[in-house]
Image: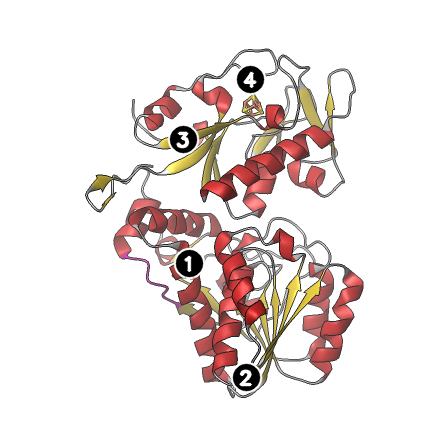
Amino acid sequence: MSRVESETITAEEMAKIDQKAAEFGIPPLLLMENAGSAVARTTMEKFDHRLKIIVFAGTGNNGGDGFVAARHLANGGAKVDVFLIGRPDDIHTEEARLNWDVIRRMKQNIKVHVVRRPPDIKKAERCLKRGGVIIDAMLGTGLKGPLREPFASAVRLINESGAPVVSVDAPTGLNPSTGEVHGLAVKATYTVTFHKMKRGFPKAKKYTGKVTVAGIGIPKEVEAVAMSKHQYSGWSICGSPKRATRLVSACLMGVNCRYDGRNNLNEKVMHLAAKEVLIPVCPEQLGGLGTPREPMGIIGGDGSEVLDGRGKVIDRNNRDVTENLVRGAEEVLKISERLGIKEAILKARSPSCGCGKIYEGTSPRLVEGDGVTTALLKRSGILVLTEDDLSISI
Ligand code: SF4
C-alpha cells in the first residue's frame, strides 16, 4: 500500500469502516451526532455563530449530519433555515429520520422547508438573498453518477450565490474517491470530512476548499478490521458472540428462486451463514415474478438508469418487467431498513442483484453497472458485495 493510500480512504472503504464500527458496538446515531457537531463547531469557529445559516440537506445520512449541525448551530444562537432536498417520506435511514423529527419540533432559531421539485428552490433563493453561510449536506460521499434534479438546481443556486459554503464530508457532486465531477459540483469554502482524508480530495481543491478532517470516535482497531481481507471480526458485546446481520441473495443460500427454478448455492456464503444471521431475499420474486420465469436483462443502461426511468428490463419474450424489478428492489430496501441492515451480499452479474458488472440485455456479454436492487441499496448507503468479494477460506 502506498503512503497516499494509507493516509487516505475511498468512500467504499469508509462505508465498510462505518459498518464495522456498528458491529464493534458504536451506534450509527452516535457517529451522526459526532459528525454533525464537528460541522457546527467548524462553522462557528470560521464564522460568527450569530450569523444566518442555510442548510441544504439530502434524504440520506449526509442530510442527517446536516440536521444535527443545524440543531447545534440554532442552540448556539444562529438563525437556521434547513431546506430538505426531497420528500420527508424519502428520508431513508432511521438516524436521519430521528434527527429530522427533532429539528421539525424545534421552534427557536430554526425553520424547515421542503424542496420536492426544481421550482421549489425559489424559496431557498429568496432566503439566500438575505445573506448567510451555506451548509451543503446533500449527498456527501454517497454520490453515484451525475446529479439529478432537484440536486442539480440546488448546486447551481449555491455556486451562483457567492455565499461561503461548508460542505459536509464531501462537496455534493464530487466523487470523493476519484476527485471527478460529472458536470456539476458544489464549490465549497471549507469541507469537513470525517475520520480520514478522502482519496480524491487532493485532486479537487477547487471544489473542496480547505479540508478539515474531524474524528468522529471510530477506534483504530475498527479501521484495521474493516481494511483487512477478513469479513468476520468476531467481536463480542456483553459476553455474547457478535452476529452481524446482512442481506443475501436467496439463490446463493440454495433457495430454488432462479429464473430456471434452480439455485446458485455458494459455499462461502453458507460458511458465513454458520457465523452470522443472513437474511435471504429474492428481489425478482418479491417484485411479483413467478418461478420459473423467462431470463431478463436491462436495456438502456444499468439499474441506476432503470430507477431514474431511462432504462428498462425486458425478458426473453420482450415483456417489460421493469415495474416488477423496481418493486422488488423497494421491498428489499424496506427489509433492510426495518432490520437496520447496512450490508448485503448479492449474486454477481444478475440484472437485479449484480454489482459492478451485469450481463448486457439477455446476452452473455458483461458490461459495467449494477442491477436494479443493488443500485437502490447503494443509493441508500448500504454496502453491497458479491459472492466473488468474499475472502473466507473454506
Ligand atoms: Fe438470485 Fe437475485 Fe436472481 Fe433472485 S433475483 S434468483 S436472488 S440473483
Specify whether tag 4 is near ligand 1 (CB below 8 Å): yes
The count of marks equals: 4
- Magenta stretch in the rendered image: 214-219
On the rendered structure, is 357 left or right of 237? right
Q: Amino acid at mark 1?
A: Leu
Residue hosting label 3: 278
Residue hosting label 2: 78
Can residue 333 be seen here? The reply is yes
Residue at x-position 53% and y-position 53%: 178
Secondary structure type for disc 3: strand
Residue 284 screen position, x and y as percent:
62, 25
Q: CA–CA distance between discs 4 and 2?
A: 55 Å
Residue at x-position 33% and y-position 38%: 229
Looking at marks 1 and 3 on the same chain, the residue that comes earlier in the sequence is marked by 1
Q: CA–CA distance between discs 1 and 4?
A: 36 Å
Q: Is residue 355 above or below residue 109?
A: above
Q: CA–CA distance between discs 3 and 4?
A: 17 Å
Residue hosting label 1: 29
Q: Taken as a whole, is the magenta stretch helix, strand or loop?
A: loop
Is the residue marked by circle 4 packed among few (<14), some (14-19), or many (20+) residues within 10 Å? Answer: many
On the rendered structure, is 243 left or right of 211? left
Q: Amino acid at mark 4?
A: Cys
